[in-house]
Amino acid sequence: MLDKETIIDEIKRVVRLLGREDISRDEFLSNTQIISRKDLENIFRGWAYAFEAAGFKPNRHYSISDEELFNEYTNLLKKLGHYPLGSLGIKEINNNSIYSGSTFKKRFKGLKNFAIEYQKWAKNKNREIFKKSLKLNTVQQSEKISEEGVVSVRNTSRYYNGKAAEFLVIAELLFRGYNAQIMPVDEGLDVFAVKEKSLYLIQIKHSSYDTPSISRQIQITLSSLDRNKGLNVFYILVLSRKEPSQRDFLILPYSKIDELIRNGIIKKIVDAKKISFKVVHTTPENAFIEKMGAANDVSRYLNAWDILL
């Protein structure tokens, strides 16, 4: 009976037979009498996973589907926190992917072209995920109905506000010439955007106000901060004030968040595995973290879309 070890041993045998470690699926199948393509798919989900399990790195781009590459590229973005481009991008892919960098490069004649095609795929994929998310949320909310038939309005409002904030940021980016869309999988980053040759990864937080001058607590998980570092990572806080009636964007680069943490202005809540802070204002044109003070002043980042340039 076939199992993983049998397939792995057979792959190693064929590699030795052909004297190369870059064999394709078709080359393998042509030199084995006991393994079929169906076996590879049923036991390993495909050739690339079987080849990698045997200790080799797949690099024959024509044996791997676009869907497999796009799914793996999503995993890469989570690991790297940025789009891998150029010669450095090839090295980053080689070190972090089950596929070689040349596989991605050859598929659409360049890593930049691959990133563009990935965005198109992710946009369509996101429509499916968003529909499922809405359906799931409806089910979850219905389960929270009490015996009197009352739904938790606060939880529903939080969900809608958060999702509205994402689309609001995307709209602002589109108006400014960025090709922006929601990430297919949310692991600390909500939106990615491209403009010319620059790529941006963004987490979005929404906060309403109990008073016109102090926001509610804004929270970011420590795991998200640790996972998503880089010059192209930004945290956009959508601030919904009650008086005056306005919605502002506090656009903080990862480096500024890190600086505020290192200076003790934003505190880490280690037990809760997060950071938590408020935004404070004295006028509609300024903003401070936690309290007024020169070290706390982030007014430069209020509605400052030029920070992304």
Image (cartoon, rainbow, N blue to C red):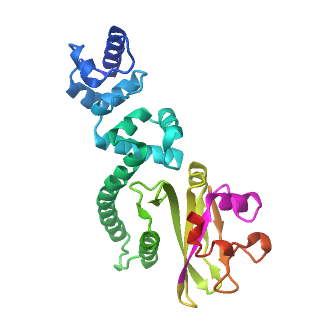
- Residue 91 visible in the current orientation: yes
Q: In the picture shown, does residue 294 fall above or below 77?
A: below
Outermost residue toward the top? Answer: 17
Is 23 on the left-hand or right-hand side of 207? left
Q: Is residue 275 left or right of residue 58?
A: right
Viewer-nearest residue: 135 or 131: 131
Instruction: Kindly identify the residue that appears in the image at 46 percent across and 77 percent down.
Output: 154
94 in the magenta segment = no
Image coordinates for residue 268, horizontal then vertical, percent: 69, 59
The residue at the point 48 percent across, 48 percent down is: 83
Indicate whether residue 260 is drawn in magenta: yes
Is 43 drawn above or below residue 144 in the view shown?
Answer: above
Q: Quadrant of residue 161?
A: bottom left
For this view, does 215 lie left or right of residue 12? right
**Residue closer to the observer: 27 or 154:** 27
Please provide percent x and percent y for residue 196: 46, 58
Magenta segment boundaries in residue numbering: 247-272
Rendered view: 14 above or below 50: above
Residue 62 at what x, y percent from top left? Answer: 28, 32
- The quarter of the image holding the N terminus is top left
> Residue 215's spot in the image, x, y percent?
61, 78
Q: Quadrant of residue 7?
A: top left
The C terminus sits in image quarter: bottom right
Give the residue displayed 39% in from the left and 38% down from the top. 105
Image: 198 above or below 33: below
